[in-house]
């Protein structure tokens, strides 16, 4: 018989051995939020879930259960085969630890597979995330990477991660690049997914002496940084990375690839067009429409993003460190040297 396990038991199991979490909710529910690292093997697809929900409301739970059983029975061979491909112990979950996860766990247990069911479902995980963030406790110092748009702050964080430094990538969690063009070509994360990833990093790095983080605004796309972390970031050591304009333009072109999303860039530009001196705005729009992206980016940096950045950043001198770098690799080397020599309190 499968076991119902509490969330903390699940965390312990994942520490002790390879363990696979299976979210048996519909694909739409899975995309909205899940437990990080889970895979989606749904009992019902989105349409089937909607159908069963309608039956539950209009004809009652028994009719809905019968229809649900009928749908899932036809899927059993494929469901079991997909789960058999996983060579670790399994824990299945749905929204509240209800019928979907119970049915899935029962079937897998009958087929001789090692399976648990998460008591309380993903709702219990979501409650834990909220409670954990409400504690507002994060001990490490923050080292904040700042710089003009295109300075490669995210690339710097990624390089620091590869060098095994502790890093919290807020833009990566939010799936947004932090500008008016930041959502183009990617699907922004919602607040629930953002918080789920964030809380995992906060726990992972709780005992580190310091953590690198990017100088982001409080809101990143659809996600909002918790007050305690944002306030800590604003009062932490700020490293300002100065990189030549031409390198910043190249970084932006490489990351955004505007030629792949030309209409989206033109549409997004309309939102900020009125905030730019009219002759410059006309030139930017003409460049975007003609494919002269390099020149468009250079104008946007010079006449919009750089002045905006200068206006929005003001930190005490004792909290600011500046580095001049020619490339991302050069910036990472100099940041590493700063950290080793002076940034972190010994």
Image (spheres, rainbow, N blue to C red):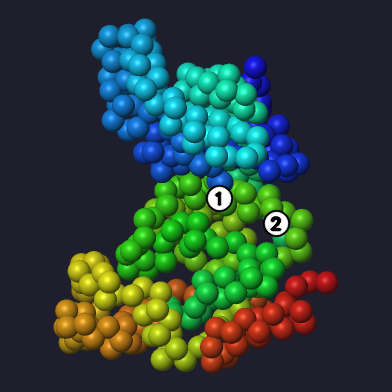
Q: Nearer the viewer, residue 113 or 219?
A: 113
Quick check: can you spot residue 160? yes
- Please report the residue visible at 72 percent of the width from the left and 77 percent of the height from the top: 339
Residue ID for mark 2: 205
Counting residues from the N terminus, which is met first, the one under dot 2 or under dot 1?
A: 1
Placement of 105 over or under 304, stated as above or below: above
- Please report the residue visible at 50 percent of the width from the left and 19 percent of the height from the top: 103
Q: In the picture provided, is 181 more to the left or to the right than 80? A: left
Asked if the residues shown at circle 2 and circle 1 are in contact, with their CB atoms under 8 angstroms apart, the answer is no
Q: In the picture provided, is 258 more to the left or to the right than 133? A: left
Quick check: can you spot residue 98? no
Image coords of residue 60 (percent x, y): 32, 9
Report the Cα–Cα distance between label 2 and label 1.
Answer: 13 Å
Quarter of the image holding residue 84?
top right
Q: Report the quarter where the C terminus lies.
A: bottom right
Residue ID for mark 1: 197
In this view, which residue lies farthest toward the right? Answer: 346
Judging from the image, what secondary structure is the residue with disc 1 in?
helix
- Please report the residue visible at 68 percent of the width from the left and 73 percent of the height from the top: 163
Judging from the image, what secondary structure is the residue with disc 2 in?
loop
Image coords of residue 50 (percent x, y): 30, 26
């Amino acid at each position: 018989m499968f076991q119902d396990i509490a969330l903390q038991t699940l965390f312990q199991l994942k520490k002790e051995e390879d363990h696979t979490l299976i979210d048996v909710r519909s694909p739409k529910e899975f995309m909205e939020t899940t437990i990080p690292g889970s895979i989606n093997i749904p009992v019902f697809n989105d349409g089937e879930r909607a159908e069963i929900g309608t039956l539950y409301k209009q004809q009652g739970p028994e009719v809905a259960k019968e229809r649900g059983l009928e749908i899932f029975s036809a899927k059993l061979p494929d469901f079991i085969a997909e789960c058999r491909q996983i060579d670790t112990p399994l824990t299945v979950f749905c929204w509240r630890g209800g019928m979907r996860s119970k049915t899935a766990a029962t079937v897998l247990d009958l087929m001789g597979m090692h399976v648990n069911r998460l008591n309380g479902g993903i709702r219990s995980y979501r409650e834990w995330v909220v409670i954990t963030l409400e504690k507002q406790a994060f001990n490490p110092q923050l080292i904040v990477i700042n710089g003009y748009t295109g300075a490669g702050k995210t690339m710097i964080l990624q390089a620091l991660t590869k060098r095994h430094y502790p890093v919290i990538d807020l833009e990566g969690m939010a799936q947004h690049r932090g500008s008016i063009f930041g959502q183009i070509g990617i699907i922004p994360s919602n607040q629930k997914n953002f918080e789920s990833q964030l809380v995992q990093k906060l726990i992972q790095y709780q005992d580190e002496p310091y953590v690198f983080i990017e100088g982001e605004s409080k809101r990143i796309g659809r996600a909002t940084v918790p007050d305690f972390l944002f306030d800590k970031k604003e009062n932490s050591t700020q490293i300002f990375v100065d990189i030549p304009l031409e390198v910043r333009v190249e970084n932006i072109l490489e990351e955004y690839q505007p030629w792949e999303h030309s209409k989206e860039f033109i549409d997004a530009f309309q939102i900020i067009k009125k905030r730019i001196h009219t002759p410059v705005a006309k030139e930017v729009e003409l460049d975007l429409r003609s494919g002269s992206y390099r020149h468009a980016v250079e104008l946007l940096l010079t006449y919009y993003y750089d002045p905006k950045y200068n206006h929005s950043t003001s930190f005490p001198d004792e909290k600011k460190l500046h580095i001049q770098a020619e490339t991302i690799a050069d910036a990472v080397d100099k940041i590493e040297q700063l950290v080793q020599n002076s940034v972190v309190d010994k």
